[in-house]
Amino acid sequence: MTLFNRTKEQTKRNDLASAQPKFYPIDVDNLHLADYQRGLRKARAKKLAERYDPDIFGIVLVSFRDGKYWVVDGQHRVECCRIRGIKTVWCQVLEGLTYEEEAAKFFEVNDSRVRLTANHKFNAKVEGKDKKALDIVKALDKYGFTYAKEATDQGDNCIRTIGTLQKIYDRHGYIGLCEVLDILRRAWNGDVRSLKAEIIRGLNTFIINYDYDKHFLIKVLESDTPWGISNRARSTTNNLNRPDCSSVCFHIAKTIRELYEEAAIKNKIRVKPCVLKAS
């Protein structure tokens, strides 16, 4: 497979050939897909069509071979144009490639890409002044937390699971998110082990389904550790008959309820019974 392991001379020739790229508007009906392409995901193309922005649409990469234009990169954008009724699209045209070389180009283009993580997307929204993202950051700041922008960001007070925070905000708003963060801060003071998705979701499940005394709840959590609660919850997930209750998050909420009720009985505090549902 020398196409994927080019010699220096081949690379030099390719660099010279690509020094002056050619760009043309091409009718979308004249753009074809070869077998090296991945399957078209219609849902993705539809989403691109709904969010169509000509400023960031980009240039479609095609190869002119055997009298036809073959899409090397951009098939979903081409389908987006079809959905929107756009007749032509600007393309960078490669010439003189064999079918095998096209396949190698397709591999190289896609293999070199780094996809945005959920945290990269969130950070971009923060910088773009998105209201939801700014609200979440405001809540984090209020209780002394930060969010991880990169995979290497970690440690006490740094929340990596930004998707969990977004789900809590979507379902329960700014106030609901603040309640979770306040309890996390006061119970475990930003301990990195308390900031895992399962702990945060489990605590949120407890909060939204249980009539509790906040001060007492914090005391109960303080007397245990997040990993201790997680281990106790996990020990119960192997003996389940109901698949709808199989998530660790649900069982963390259930474990918190048990600890709360045990402490309430010990301290003679009346608590209202509840039925927990997975968040």
Image: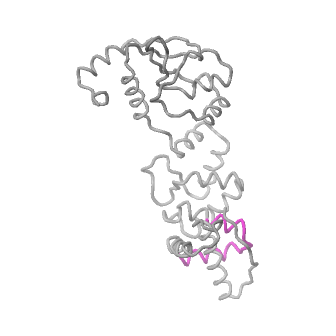
- Residue 60: say if magenta: no
Lateral position of residue 95 relative to residue 42, left or right: left
At which x and y percent is residue 79? 60, 26
- Identified at 65% across, 88% down, the residue is 266
Residue 112 in picture, x, y percent from top left: 40, 34
Picture colour scheme: one colour
Q: Quadrant of the image for the C terminus?
A: bottom right
* Residue 173 sits above or below residue 98 on the image: below
**136 shown above or below 35:** below
The vertical placement of 118 against 164, above or below, is: above
* Residue 76 position in % (x across, y down): 57, 29
The span shown in magenta is 202-224
Look at 54% across and 66% down and name the residue there.
189
Farthest residue toward the right? 272
Residue name at image x 52 percent, y 26 percent: 74
Q: Is residue 233 left or right of residue 49?
A: left
Say which residue appears at 55% left-offset and 60% top-offset.
197
The answer to whether residue 115 is left or right of residue 214 is left
Quadrant (top left/top right/bottom left/bottom right) for the N terminus: top left
Residue 13 occupies quadrant: top left
**Position in image of residue 34 (x %, y %):** 48, 25
- Magenta stretch: dominant SS? helix
Q: Quadrant of residue 127?
A: top right
The magenta stretch spans residue 206: yes
Tally of numbered discs = 0
